[in-house]
Image (cartoon, rainbow, N blue to C red):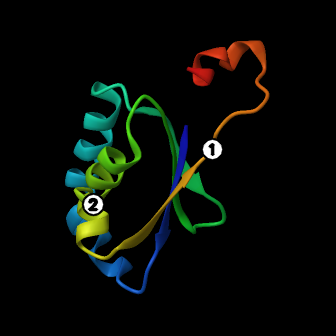
Amino acid sequence: MFVVTLTFSHNTARAADLMEGHKAWIQRGFDRGIFLMVGSLQPDRGGGILAHNVAREDLEAFVSEDPFVAGNVVTADVLEITPARLDERLEFLAA
């Protein structure tokens, strides 16, 4: 399982121009079965993603395709978590 943080950089002025491409990239992540959740980091720090069912190298390559990452609107950090204990509702993450 992975947590991806997308932290705003100094180049946030480009966000509006790249927003449609960013939204399309997010949808591709859900369509491919990679993204479990996408949301905003508070207060106004960027975005966060829970990802699963993907190799780290493939996820890093996919994250680099995000127009916000490519356009330097955000910096991405991929954190890998190996679950040690899970609520039964999240057992699918143990695989």
Q: In terms of image quadrants, where is residue 76? A: bottom left
Q: Name the residue under label 1.
A: 81
**48 horizontally vs 72: left or right:** right
Give the CA separation, mark 1 to mark 2.
Answer: 20 Å
Q: Nearer the viewer, mark 1 or mark 2?
A: 1
Q: Which amino acid, by three-letter code, is at mark 1?
A: Ile
Q: Nearer the viewer, residue 77 or 24?
A: 77
Which quadrant, please, contains the C terminus?
top right
Q: Nearer the viewer, residue 63 or 42?
A: 63
Circle number at residue 72 = none
The image shows residue 18 at horizontal and vertical percentages of 22, 63
Q: Nearer the viewer, residue 69 or 78?
A: 78
* Figure check: 17 above or below 23: below
Q: Is mark 2 on a helix, strand or loop?
A: helix
* Figure check: 57 above or below 87: below
Q: Residue at 28% x, 27% y: name it.
A: 32
Q: Is mark 1 on a helix, strand or loop?
A: loop
User: Nearer the N terminus, badge 1 or badge 2?
Assistant: 2
Circle number at residue 64 = 2
**95 horizontally vs 57: left or right:** right
The image shows residue 60 at horizontal and vertical percentages of 34, 54
Q: Which amino acid, by three-letter code, is at mark 2?
A: Ser
Q: How crowded is mark 2: few (under 14 residues within 10 Å), some or many (20 or more)?
A: some
* Figure check: 60 above or below 46: above
The image shows residue 85 at horizontal and vertical percentages of 79, 28
Q: Residue furthest bottom?
A: 10
Q: Residue at 41% x, 86% y: name it.
A: 10
Asked whether the beta carbons under mark 1 and mark 2 sit within 8 Å of each other, the answer is no
Q: Which residue lies furthest to the top in this view?
A: 88
